[in-house]
Image (spheres, rainbow, N blue to C red):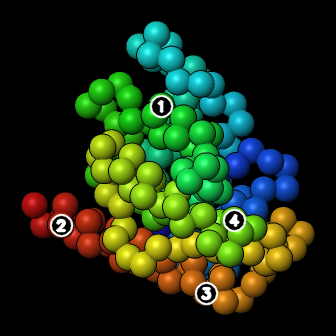
């Protein structure tokens, strides 16, 4: 069986990002289930439709290509003011354009949030789902993956807390099942 490739998008640019640490923990724990590549969003400029014609910035073209090459996407965000990070929203805006040509159209996407607060960023989840629905991506509908107190669950730049990691891996398993189901449907069509 072919190993499925997943793309991770972290909504945090911090060097010691907890969101990125969660993705690194998943990379380490996935084993042969799937390969997870993390795409850095540092070089993605603020969305400007004037720059999004035939000559989109190279970093944006790379993001779109990485999304298209993956079987599914895992996106994780901290919660800022009851919403997802501006960094992640901006990346989704670029990925969804030009209109009608979204790199995420029909792509299975698993959402996660992580926060030092006990709520784990849960209030950002609704905004993530609304944005994904409008793209239109294919969000994995399951209990929300929120990791509260994440700063106490990370060491050496990756998630190490067994309970949080198992919770997140269960979501990844659901994403992989969604990908397999979508591939089966396409093959049968």
Q: Which residue is mark 4?
A: 115
Q: Nearer the viewer, mark 4 or mark 1?
A: 4
Q: CA distance from mark 3 to mark 2?
A: 29 Å
Q: CA distance from mark 1 to mark 3?
A: 32 Å
- Point out the tag, 1 or 3, that comes first from the N-terminus: 1
Q: Which residue is mark 3?
A: 166
Pick the residue in front: 124 or 168.
Answer: 124
On screen, residue 149 above or below 35: below
**SS class of the residue under badge 4?**
strand
Q: Which residue is mark 2?
A: 185
10 Å neighbourhood of mark 3: few (<14), some, or many (≥20)?
Answer: few
Residue 29 rendering spot, x and y as whole percentages: 67, 79
Q: What label sits on residue 94 in the rendered view?
A: 1
Would residue 178 be found to the left or right of residue 65 on screen? left
Residue at figure coordinates x 57%, y 44% from the top left: 88
Pick the residue in front: 44 or 127.
Answer: 127
Q: Nearer the viewer, mark 3 or mark 2?
A: 3
Residue farthest to the front? 81
**SS class of the residue under badge 2?**
helix
Would residue 103 be found to the left or right of residue 47 on screen? left
Q: Nearer the viewer, mark 4 or mark 3?
A: 4
């Amino acid at each position: 069986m072919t190993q499925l490739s997943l793309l991770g998008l972290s909504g945090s640019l911090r060097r010691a990002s907890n969101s990125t640490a969660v993705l690194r923990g998943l990379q380490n724990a996935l084993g042969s289930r799937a390969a997870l590549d993390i795409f850095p969003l540092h070089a993605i400029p603020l969305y400007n439709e004037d720059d999004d014609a035939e000559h989109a910035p190279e970093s944006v073209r790379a993001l779109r290509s990485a999304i298209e090459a993956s079987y599914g996407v895992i996106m994780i965000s901290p919660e800022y003011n009851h919403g997802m990070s501006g960094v992640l929203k901006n990346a989704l805006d670029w990925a969804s354009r030009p209109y009608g040509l979204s790199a995420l159209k029909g792509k299975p996407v698993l959402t996660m949030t992580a926060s030092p607060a006990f709520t784990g960023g849960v209030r950002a989840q609704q905004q993530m789902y609304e944005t994904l629905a409008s793209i239109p991506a294919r969000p994995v509908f399951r209990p929300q993956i929120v990791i509260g107190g994440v700063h106490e669950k990370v060491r050496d730049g990756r998630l190490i807390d067994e309970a949080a990691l198992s919770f997140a891996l269960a979501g990844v398993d659901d994403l992989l099942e969604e990908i397999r189901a979508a591939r089966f449907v396409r093959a049968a069509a």
